[in-house]
Image (tube, grey):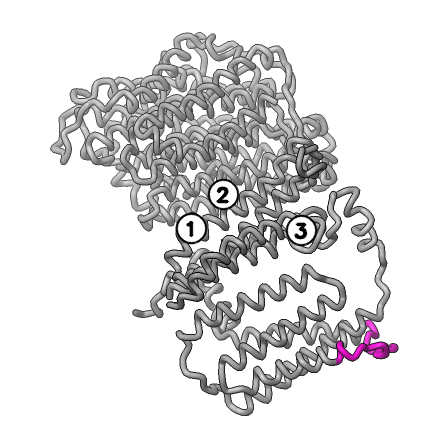
Amino acid sequence: MGIITSILSGFALAFIAPVLYRFGRGATGWIVAMLPLGLAAYFSSLIPQVCSGEVITESFRWIPSLGINLSFYLDGLSLLFALLISSIGALILIYAGRYLSGHPCLGRFYLYILMFMASMLGVVLADNLITLFVFWELTSLSSYFLIGFEHDRHESRAAALQALLVTGIGGLALLAGFILLGQTGESLELSNLLNSGDAIRNHQLYTPILLLVLAGAFTKSAQVPFHFWLPSAMEAPTPVSAYLHSATMVKAGIYLLARLSPVLGGTDLWLYSLTTAGAATMVVGAYMAIQQSNLKLILAYSTVSVLGILTMLLGLGTELAIKAAMVFLVGHVLYKAALFLVAGAVDHETGTRDVNRLGGLWRAMPITAIAAGLAALSMSGLPPFFGFIGKELFYEAGLTVQSAAHLLTGVSMLTGMLLFVAAGMAGIRPFIGRQYILHKKPHEPPVSLWLGPVLLAGSGLACGVAPGLVDTSLVAPAVSAIIGHPVPVKLALWHGLNPALVIGTITVAGGLGLFAVRSRLIKVLSPLSNVVVLSPTYLYKRSLDGLMAIASLQARIIQSGYQRYYLLIIFTVTAALVLYTLISLGGLHGPVNLSNIQFYEAGLAALILMGALLSILTNSRFTAVAALGVVGYSVALIYIIYGAPDLATTQILIETLTVILFVLVVYHLPIFSKFSSVAARIRDALISLFAGGTMTALVLKATNVQFHPTISSYFAENSVPLAHGRNIVNVILVDFRALDTLGEITVLAVAGIGVYALLKLKLKPEGV
Amino acid sequence: MDSIILRTAARYLMPIFLLFSVIILLRGHNAPGGGFIGGLLAAGAFVFYTIAYGVAAAGRKLLVAPYTLIALGLLVAFGSSILSFFNDQPFMTGEWSVLNTPWLGKLHIGTPLVFDAGVYLVVIGVTTTIVFSLAEE
């Protein structure tokens, strides 16, 4: 029960948080942070168990007939991610409470971000693929809310929509891939699929499965050419960027690739698609990063680059590469989240994120500056930081591949140098050198704004100096989970004089050189980037515009905006389809039993007919409504005659309310007049006769056909024993067919809100 | 509408209407009635009150905003399914228990009643939302 409780508690707190905020105000961040802190403690307590190779599973039936269960699976890989999500979540909540203090929607912010945290935990802990998918989509959804948090700004909304569309389309592909995977592997549970990798890889559906899953993972983890949504997502408040768009959500794709590599990995297709996409992404990301002047954009593009590195390493799939990927991932989370939070603090204190206007801040904000420096050094891959160990392993993994090792190493070195420059620009440059004149005089921010960066950057240093803190406890189980058998991991700062160290040194030297000439470099390269790298954004915009154009064209054709035409089309089409079916199935032939009609039934029919005729012939609205009332009440009487009191009561109540509604609107209606021409009226009369006649034929036929009696007799027999009710109509509504009713009342609710919106919005006509 | 007869009648009929609507809701499982009919009746009471005293007064009688009632109803209806989840049964399985009460004898209590209460609230919410918005125009 531990795993599901940990996830559900996140959702529960999410929905309580806005209320909590009303009472907790400024302290709310600290209060809600207790939950992820507790979760982190819980997950830490599982480390010994998981280290010994144990896998913790939990399962609840959901839709067993389809093999869909709410099941969870916790091994080394899940544990590593769960720990990162919960512990960084706590720091982010503390930070956000201060960073966004005074924001009118802060309560809602806690809701969104806790919902995200719980969903993300669900993604990494899910066993069933459909469960995983549901949580996956929930992270996209909460990301949408968080990017669009400043919803009164157009850029925010556009960026949120872009992220949702890109990851959403990927999500659909992923769902298709999961379903195929489930059919091929004959189970939707990851725990089963992990053992049937060979069968799946040799199956003819392997290629479509892999491509669909990759579409999901690549869009989520911002691989080229889907990388463009991530920099746009920087419209989100900085804590969100730190949490979702660098530390956790964008790693969901990486998690998925890692998770499925025992199932789908190890083939040529896997190798080439992942390494190509990864290598392209890491170069493009790093290259774009150094061209930015906005702190957050530098960090965003460098995140894209790192996601590329991780994808490439997972694609290589060797033991060394997987080890490198996990170490790099942890290192990246620590320094990148710290740098994002620092960027937020700098923005908070100075009012700008433009690196060209920031300098010498270390005097005013020494603690922040130290955190930034530590994180930036780790990002640059300098010893004794954890980033150094990750980078060494990364180069080593590249050197040991069989083919194209030189190319790969060259590309990796280029990326390394560019990331070095980006680290200097984002983490060092704003704090050293001369000070610029700013609108705000910067101060050291309060503890909640520097606690996160200091802890994160400090951990980056601690893990570098003493890699024993994490190697056997966290990294080894994760690597073992990806490889599929236990792998010992022993990390050390000093590997001896080896090629990776030489390459690392060259990278640092090259990075220093590039950093010195970066302004000239940017000038030279900028025309190029407009052509090559911006094109996905352009394509996205064009396809979105195209979609809108098609939609409005279609709306112009189908949606006339006149109710009479809608009714005309609906009645004609329905009647024609019914008539076609009746004729094609021979329904118009056969005996029609019109005997044993009682006199009162005939009387009611006559009453209905007269009411209907009067309502269309009269010149007074009141007469028309009263005549329609006659029709309605007569129908209710028919229900009573045929023994359906529930239906009759409902009909009578609805008729009554309709009259009242009419009374409410009658004063607003224009004077009664005839708009339609004689020809139009004749056309309408013909159509209504046609529709009415067809329905009559259908009803006559239906009463003469003997249906299979099982359903109604089943309801009649089981109403009392199964559902404890003697009113079968009600039992069907609230028990046997309760899901239908739930759908119906939801539609009702939407309709009610729609009416409210129509009446209250008072939309201005176009062009005014 | 400024009519003293209507106003006096509304004041006394309103509680009777509402009480009756609850009875209809509760007895629905065994006899004609249920959440939908009960909800319409209760909504009728509020509509009646609206005609006599106006939207503002009727809104105060409703205690919460009509659209809150819609949301509440959906939540209650959906919430009735939670129990089946914890009992490890398919979604929305009706859960029943029999209570022995001193006055009412054996009482069958089940989640479908909670669900029906949700329907009841949604119907009141939707109807009053529409009527209030129209009447305010």
Work out whether residue B101 or residue A102 is closer to the camera in this orientation and state it: B101
Compute the Cα span from label 1 to label 3: 26 Å
Q: Is residue B3 left or right of residue A568?
A: left
Q: Is mark 2 in CB contact (under 8 Å) with mark 1? A: no
On what subunit does the disc labeled 3 rest? B
The label shown at residue A167 is: 2
Query: At 55% from the left edge and 30% from the top edge, which residue is drawn?
Result: A122
Which residue type does callout 3 highlight?
Answer: Gly
Query: Which of the marked residues, 1 or 3, is nearer the chain's N terminus?
Result: 3
Q: Are marks 1 and 3 on the same chain?
A: yes
Which residue type does callout 2 highlight?
Answer: Thr
A593 in magenta: yes
On what subunit does the disc labeled 1 rest? B
| Residue tagged 1 | B65
Q: Nearer the viewer, mark 2 or mark 1?
A: 1
Under circle 3, the secondary element is loop
Q: Nearer the viewer, mark 1 or mark 3?
A: 3
Q: Residue A764: x percent and y percent?
A: 34, 67
Under circle 1, the secondary element is loop
Disc 3 crowd, CA 10 A, few/some/many (<14, 14-19, 20+): many
Q: Residue furthest right?
A: A591
| Residue tagged 3 | B28
Q: Is residue A266 visible?
A: no
Q: Nearer the viewer, mark 2 or mark 3?
A: 3
Q: Is mark 2 in CB contact (under 8 Å) with mark 3? A: no
Q: Residue A196: x percent and y percent?
A: 72, 29
Q: Is residue A364 above or below residue A244?
A: above
Q: Residue A562: x percent and y percent?
A: 49, 75
- Provide the residue span drawn in magenta: A584-602
On what subunit does the disc labeled 2 rest? A
